[in-house]
Image (cartoon, helix red, strand yellow):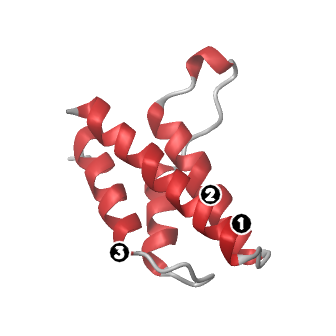
Amino acid sequence: MAPSQAELAVKVLSLLKSAKLARDDKALQQAADLTKLVAPAKLSELTPRFEAYFAIATLVTALRYREDSNTLDRRFAHAVSLSTMWVQLQS
């Protein structure tokens, strides 16, 4: 049985909190994979899960392109914030 949205949100947030800001971090990649969704056709269809996915995927891309540490820290904080919001909305 597939996990509920609430269980998935909690798992993703846990993975983010254990992740290291490294290009090959498995927890970060797993968080991106678990949240992955197809982009909605309209902005009105954006969900907290998609917002978390987009923030995490952007962070993964930034790590690949070796952005500076200040930018990575901000992207990471944003991903955690959106994932936390997703968890709270599922509760």
C-alpha gap between disc 1 and disc 2: 6 Å
C-alpha gap between disc 3 and disc 2: 16 Å
**Residue 66, placed above or below residue 13:** below
> Could you tell me which residue is drawn at 30 percent across and 49 percent down?
8
Q: Position of residue 65 (x, y in %)?
A: 80, 75
Q: How many marks?
A: 3
Callout 1 secondary element: helix
Sequence-first tag of 3 and 2: 3
Residue type at tag 3: Ser
Q: Which residue is mark 2?
A: 57
Q: Position of residue 6 (x, y in %)?
A: 24, 40
Q: Position of residue 75 (x, y in %)?
A: 61, 59
Q: In which quadrant of the rendered image does the C terminus lie?
A: top left
Sequence-first tag of 3 and 1: 3
**Viewer-closest of 70 and 6:** 70
User: Which numbered dot is residue 18?
Assistant: 3
**Residue 51, placed above or below residue 73:** above
| 3 or 2: mark nearer the eye | 3
Q: Which residue is mark 1?
A: 61
